Image (cartoon, rainbow, N blue to C red):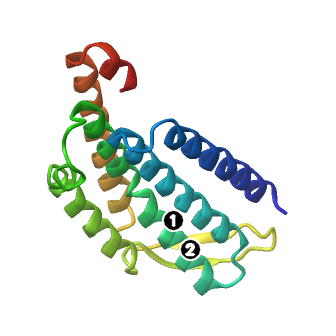
Amino acid sequence: MTDPLAITLVSLAINVLLGVIVMWANPRRLANRQFLGLIIVGSCWLVALAFSFTARSEGSFLFWVRITSIVGALVPIAFRLVRLAVLTPSVAMLDLLKRSRWQLGVFSFIAIYCLTEFYMEGVRFPADGVPDPIHGSLAVLFPLLFLGLAGHEIVQLIRGIRSSRGIRRYEL
């Protein structure tokens, strides 16, 4: 087992354990369920990352790197849902998703984009075994969109912390 794979699997175990502990504390609470969703997204990202480390063919590597990127783009949205669940605990899940329409739209664009050759064209397998991806002509688009989503959520989190009091502020 390679070092990156071992580290990824340990991280996955810690991630799942954390999700189980939080969910066990109060499974009916919306914020806990949204946190479990964040844990699931993080776990799926770690699993896809582990599969990309073990890929031995170009097709397999490209598939798993694309899946890793798509699932990674869900992380800011999962954070948003946790934040909204903490700030508005009486709101239904569907309402949280409605409040996240434009973020889900950006995610949909990212997901489709990651499946094209504009994102990644191929991969080189050098002698040392570390795959070297060949990025497409618009590869810079993914980090820009991801950082835009993440940056927006960080700003919203800071605003939420400043405007909240008591336990909600602590939870954020």
Q: Where does label 2 land, which residue?
A: 64
Find residue 26 and report its horizontal and vertical position in percent.
45, 38
Q: Along the horizontal axis of the image, is 94 left or right of 21? A: left
Q: Are marks 1 and 2 in contact (CB under 8 Å)?
A: yes
Q: In this view, which residue lies farthest toward the right?
A: 1
Q: Quadrant location of the N terminus?
A: bottom right
Q: Which mark is residue 68?
A: 1
Q: Nearer the viewer, residue 90 or 98?
A: 90
Q: Amino acid at mark 1?
A: Thr
Question: Which picture quadrant has residue 125?
Answer: bottom right
Q: Image point 24% across, 31% down: which residue?
A: 87
Badge 1, how many Cα within 10 Å: few under 14, some, many 20+? many
Q: Image point 22% across, 24% down: which residue?
A: 159
Find residue 70 and report its horizontal and vertical position in percent.
42, 66
Q: How many marks?
A: 2
Q: Which mark is residue 161?
A: none
Distance (Cα) linking label 1 and label 2 = 6 Å
Q: Nearer the viewer, residue 107 or 129?
A: 107
Q: Image point 15% across, 49% down: which residue?
A: 99
Q: Is residue 2 above or below residue 156?
A: below
Q: Secondary structure at mark 2?
A: helix
Q: Nearer the viewer, residue 162 or 133?
A: 162
Q: Amino acid at mark 2?
A: Trp
Q: Is residue 169 above or below residue 141?
A: above
Find residue 8 and report its horizontal and vertical position in percent.
69, 54
